[in-house]
Image: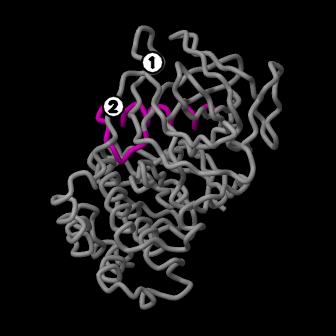
Amino acid sequence: MSLSLPSHVPAPVITPTEPVPVCTSTELVPAPSSSSRQFTRYRDWSTGSTFEYLGTIAAGGFGCALRVMARNRFLALKVCADTEEKKPSYDREVAMLSMLKKDWHPNIIAFGSAFKDRDQLCVSLELANMSLEDALRATNKLDVKSAKHIATGIARGISHLHGHQILHRDIKPENILLTGAFSKHAIISDFGLSISLKDKPMGARGECGTMRYRAPEMMGKNYYSYPVDVYAYGVTVFRVVGGHFPEQGGHVQLTNMEAKSLVDQLMHQVVGLRLDIDKALEHSFFQVLEADQKSNPSSGSGSKRPLESVTNHGHDTKRARHDYDNDNGDVLEGIYDSVHISFSARPVGQVHSLEVVKVTLAVDDDHACSSI
């Protein structure tokens, strides 16, 4: 299976305080705290593409997330062991990503390919500059203009998912990746808990996702639908604008009245009174931004576009730069899809050591695991 990836605007240079580890050995490299083995290269035997290991982004119970290069392009490669425990979740995630790729949207992460090498299951995905969680840890909250820009991108991505009858079930800053020259273009990632509602007229069931972003109707054995993503989006907007979780101060702590009005409707406890995502995009909170983008088209998010696959022979191998190079030649980048992890903050001019915060994987549609 091979699918195309989008390009990125070059990211600003960031000088690290700690270099990201790079593999220089040709031997098997152990993955810390992981049940998966880690190799210096991976091959998709169906296409002949080779993914060269450049460094480990993170490792945990799910397996490893690696920074790799394939045909002169930097990618993320999620690797996990081919076991009875992980295979169902892997298959479901790949199916979801493949379905989304048929109608690719610029606010959804791009899926490259899925393959098995030796006893390892692999998924290649695009890289991003950082996660929204990284940005919030570095600055606590964003300025209003940046918040509106990022919140708009997230809402458009959710709208695309819901239009395809896909329920994400884990919308939160860790799963929102930021790309572009100023890291303000938002893309939704991590579909390990997502589910198609196409053949589920009653909706989905099962307590899943992260507790602080979980809608009230997800508790117990209730059926629920798209409003749970809207609720989680509301919590995310609250954090982006207010700098903390709602329960740490309440909605009254939002000084921006437009944001308060929006969040109150996104997080309404009564499901029937909660805004749907398309109505949310019409809220006055976003209107000034829309006017600004119309007068300044370059400020929009149109820089991402599909490119030919890096896993096919005979395609252009022109290098797509979306990494950070410093004077020492270290290459730093990377958030990736398909696993529930987040990293430590990356303030401007500084990169902290990587920290795995949370890892979960779903087993099936109605009995997905609860996040910690």
| Residue positioned 78% across, 39% down in the render | 34
Q: Name the residue under label 1.
A: 317
Q: From the viewer's side, name the closer residue of 65 and 121.
A: 65
Please report the bounds of the magenta region as a residue range: 87-109
Where residue 78 appears, as percent x and y from the top left, is 61, 34
Predominant SS along the magenta part: helix
Number of numbered discs overlaid on the protein picture: 2
Looking at the rendered structure, the kind of residue marked 1 is Thr
- In which quadrant of the rendered image does the C terminus lie? bottom right
Position of 229 with respect to 16 (left or right) is: left
Q: From the viewer's side, name the closer residue of 109 and 23.
A: 23
Q: Mark 2 points at which residue?
A: 306
Disc 1 is placed on an element classified as: loop
245 vs 88: above or below: below
Disc 2 is placed on an element classified as: loop
| Residue positioned 44% across, 13% down in the render | 312
Residue 102 is inside the magenta segment? yes
| Residue positioned 48% across, 65% down in the render | 218
235 vs 366: above or below: below
What coloring was used for the rendering?
A: one colour
User: To which quarter of the image does residue 252 belong?
Assistant: bottom left
Where residue 253 appears, as percent x and y from the top left, is 45, 89
Where residue 348 appears, as percent x and y from the top left, is 58, 61
Looking at the rendered structure, the kind of residue marked 2 is Pro
Label 2: few (<14), some (14–19) or many (≥20) C-alpha neighbours in 10 Å: some
